[in-house]
Image (cartoon, coloured by chain):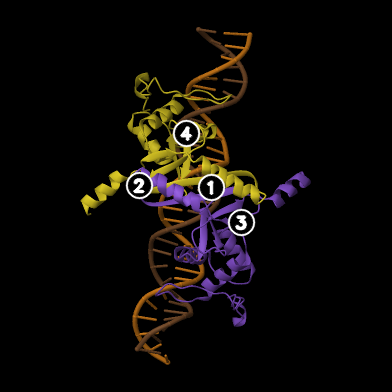
Chain colours: A yellow, B purple, C orange, D brown
Amino acid sequence: MAKQAEGKASVSPGTQVTLAIGQRSTKQRAAVATALRDIDDFRSAQEIFEIVKSRGDNVSLTTVYRSLQAMASIGDIDVLLNSEGEALYRRCGQRSGHHHHLVCRKCGFTVEVEGPAVERWTHDVARKQGFTDINHTLDIFGVCSSCARKAKTARV
Amino acid sequence: MAKQAEGKASVSPGTQVTLAIGQRSTKQRAAVATALRDIDDFRSAQEIFEIVKSRGDNVSLTTVYRSLQAMASIGDIDVLLNSEGEALYRRCGQRSGHHHHLVCRKCGFTVEVEGPAVERWTHDVARKQGFTDINHTLDIFGVCSSCARKAKTARV
DNA sequence: CTCTTATTGATAATGATTGTCATTAAATCA
DNA sequence: TGATTTAATGACAATCATTATCAATAAGAG
């Protein structure tokens, strides 16, 4: 039942889905990619599941998880863990290489930032201690100006 | 049953437990603090629970969680999330102020590092974007020289 | 010693994520 | 184009870390 509305795919035609070798192109993955294209901030898998559903596409939660993981492993989307350890996903911005995020704790508004000096510093520190196979996490959280303004006005 | 071995507390007498106002000093919390004193690397709550038990102290997993949280909220111990989002705890090292961690993915060996330049950079970036109430995560993961050596020798 | 209440422990509940497995449908091939 | 292969899906169970519940216990104050 729920026959997915006679073939009228709500998936935007422009949405590009990158596939690894041996992978297949499905409408479910396209639906997730499209939903991701519409939002600017980091969202949990559950939230993305809701967004996909609200667009009229029918994709199971399991598949949303799998699609997000597949995309993330290719580097097609960004992942970060919030302070609760929950994974948040977002389509990659303009910066293709290694970058970090400045995320608003209130609304999720995100800015991608680069810091070559920081990259160098982390590698230097690690190498100096004899560490190899190095990676690092660096995310900045705060309250964006828009939310700060709202908070001052609202007085809840 | 299991009467906790006639009062002979296995908790090292030297172990200091910091208390917030209104808090009480219990043998359970002391046991967790003592276990923490014996290890140098970041461990999960479950692991610390095992360590406490192996020392002969009987503390429920729930209480271990609560103790760790209490200590962490006072800044008595360090917490970080590994890539799975699991919380890892460790007694504070010598550096009392704000610092970061260089952690071995294999054995948990940890080095505390400071980077005033990085602190400044994160704040500058965030302020420049209009963010306030800023904090950040920065942890470096890698394989320590000891584990790298072992891996080369072992060939499992 | 008594009283107040923070703390504990046993256990259930939560919530995100992963595993299972039969079914479906891309991509390939004849 | 129809048959074949197997990646992908979906419904649902299972994990696993962490938190909530709540009655019983025990610090610390009086």
The image shows residue A96 at horizontal and vertical percentages of 49, 31
Q: Same chain for marks 2 and 1?
A: yes
Q: Which residue bears the numbered disc 4?
A: A77
Q: Callout 3: residue from which chain? A: B
Mark pair 3, 2: CA separation: 31 Å
Looking at the rendered image, the quarter that the N terminus of chain B falls into is: bottom right
The image shows residue D27 at horizontal and vertical percentages of 46, 80
Q: Is residue A107 left or right of residue B144?
A: left
**Marks 4,2: beta carbons within 8 A:** no
The image shows residue D3 at horizontal and vertical percentages of 58, 13
**Marks 4,3: beta carbons within 8 A:** no
Quadrant of residue A41 within the rendered picture:
top left
Q: Which residue bears the numbered disc 2?
A: B131
Pointer 3 local density, CA inside 10 Å: few below 14, some 14–19, many at least 20? many
Q: Callout 4: residue from which chain? A: A
Q: Callout 1: residue from which chain? A: B
**Marks 3,2: beta carbons within 8 A:** no
Pointer 2 local density, CA inside 10 Å: few below 14, some 14–19, many at least 20? many
Mark pair 4, 1: CA separation: 18 Å
Mark nearer the viewer, 3 or 1:
3
